[in-house]
Amino acid sequence: MTHTAKQGKSLNGGRSRRGQVLVMALLVISLMVGLIFLVYNTGDYINHRLAMQNVADSVAISGAGWIARSMNVIAMNNCAQARMIGLVPVFDSLPLASEIGLLNVIAYEKMMLNALAKLPRDADPNVRKNLEAILRALRAEKKILIGLNSTFNGDLDMMMVTHWKVEGMGEADPPHGSMWRTMKALEDFSYVTWQSSAVLAQANAVRFGEANGADVAVLLPMTPMLPAKVGEYSDFKPVIDGSFEMADDWWRMYPKGPGMGGTIPDMSYPYRLGPWATLFWWRWYGGGASGVFLRGASAPIGPMLEPPPAEEFTDTRTGIRSGHRQDGKITQDPWETYGPFTWAFNRVYWMLDFTVPLSNMHEIFVRIAEAKESYAFATPVALKTVHRPEWVCLGSFGEALVYYVASNAPILDQYSRGIHKTTWVHISSARETIPGEKNIGDIETSIEEYDGWVDMRGGRPELGPSIWGTEEDVEVPVPPGADNPEGNKTETIHLIDYYVFGGIDIGGDVDVRNPFNWDEQEVVNLPKPLLFDTGPVSEYEYVYNPSEPTRNDRVFGFLGIVRDDVKARVWPGRFRDISPLGGVVVLAQSKLFNNTSWDLWTQDWQVQLMPICRWEEWTRELVVGQWELGYVQGVVDEGEYNKIMWYLGNLTEDMVWQYFNH
């Protein structure tokens, strides 16, 4: 009995302990399940927050990117307007230049035909071959010039393209040429881009945020207006006429004076040099052993330079040498900018010089284009003139002599016009021969024009009608050398020297018409650029200061704010969000910058992410944004914005730095 009772007591105690273990096991299992739920929900929350961080980055970048693209659009429009102003005098010069070039080449062709007809029968055959070759070249140029002249003075009315006012259209208010209408359209495009940039930047940021899953997306500033102001037509003058010169650490700017262009009106050294020198690399290089002289400069600029050593440095974008090493340091080669007018002018000039050189059209183009360019920013009191030739007495010296004599007798009206130029065809041989042989050197033929009446007969014998000159063998000494140690040898050279009368030019001067033909009342309607506005205290001016990196980062900052509702996937009633807003709030900051030139002419504005800074300013922007909600036309919900403003307004900069920077 006793043994049985003790045994039963032992059994009851074991059951009690087993119950305690079961309770503990259930408790441990519950804790493990809770921990698993916590880990899962926390991991899900972190993953969601990381995803929202990418969304916030896209909000900050997309909003700032819209401002960058808007600034680049305005910069491209400004440059396009400037190029068109530069092209106006170039294009408007082509009708008159092609007409005069064609008149010249037709006359020169007849002069060559007369020269061929007047050559002596015993003339060296190489002379005839030379004249025939020039005649073929003149006829080839004539074909080109006939096409140019028929285009510029027939099919195409250049006034409809280049003139501010197209007169003679029978309208009380003459229309503008197509280039001026395009410039005005670019001005309107720039203005609309500027005025709409705030709303569209905000809308772009919100669209990117919502498209990537955010419930609320906001960009600060609420209305990020790009820093611009409306300029004047005269602001294009330094771009066309101004000049910027650089040599080592010396620089000089001519914003209003005559030059080759390439200077922006709001230039400041060294961060706002404009696109022509820094982006397009439109530069002239110069220099010398005795000093640095740049075009248009009256004195050396910069320190005296020795001749550059062999070690040189080349710009990778252009392949142009940009500097050399001197005294152990890199020295920048001197350069000077040029702008759109010079850019277009040079291309047309060298094209004409290459394709129709005998017509002299390239030199005629220079005189006309420079005259027209002088009208660009000042309405002239009187138009400038250029000579338009009228060739007569072609190949007949006797007729020309009669005209010359009669032109000095005022009673004879048909000869009342004076002689502007006299032209002779000069044929000669160069003294480049093979020693010891009788030979003829290279034949040189030129159409020589002289001002007024010039008689080139001199004492030359007359070889035929309207031709004078000589063709003879001449013994000349051979310089001392290995084959002629005593210097007493001679060689025979066959010399040719012909002057064939060409003709006389009795033409007169014609006005160089003005495509910039507005009056004083119309100046306000001329196309204008948008200029960079630094603000009343130059707050947007870029001044790099290595000792204050955060201050440098404050220029053109943008803050992207994203909020997204997050509910625990498991047991949401127990696992509530720690945020008072009931979700994830994520921030990202971006900045807008231009590494090339800090202006609205240089199309190099870019954006990138950066650490969050200037929190006090962002809290002020939150308050300002509340008043600007109406300007973004319902893009941002007012209630959601007020929640975000309340939440972020309670955060300190340390909290922001710890929880929102990445």
Image (tube, helix red, strand yellow):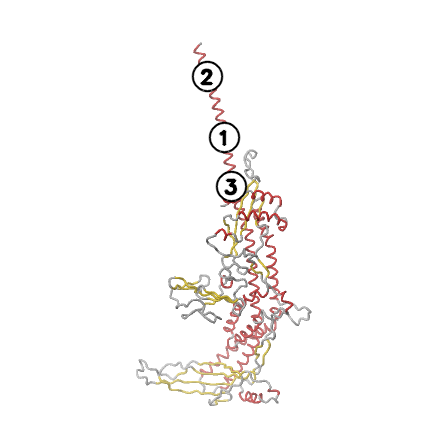
Image spot of residue 649 (x, y percent):
56, 44
Dot 1 surroundings within 10 Å: few (below 14), some, or many (20 or more)? few
Residue 391 position by quadrant: bottom right
Q: Mark 2 points at which residue?
A: 11
Say which label, 3 or 2, has the lower sequence index: 2
Q: In the image, what residue type sits under mark 1?
A: Leu
Task: Identify the residue at image location x=61%, y=62%.
Answer: 185
Task: Identify the element where label 3 is drawn.
Answer: helix
Residue 173 position by quadrant: bottom right
* Image: 169 above or below 436: above
Q: In the image, what residue type sits under mark 2?
A: Leu
Q: Work out how far the residue at label 1 is from the one at label 3, CA to CA, in angstroms.
A: 24 Å
- What quarter of the picture does the N terminus occupy? top left
Say which label, 1 or 3, has the lower sequence index: 1
Q: Name the residue under label 1.
A: 31
Dot 2 surroundings within 10 Å: few (below 14), some, or many (20 or more)? few
Q: Work out how far the residue at label 2 is from the one at label 1, CA to CA, in angstroms.
A: 31 Å
Q: Mark 3 points at which residue?
A: 47
User: Depth-wise, is mark 2 or mark 1 nearer the camera?
Assistant: 1
Task: Identify the element where label 1 is drawn.
Answer: helix
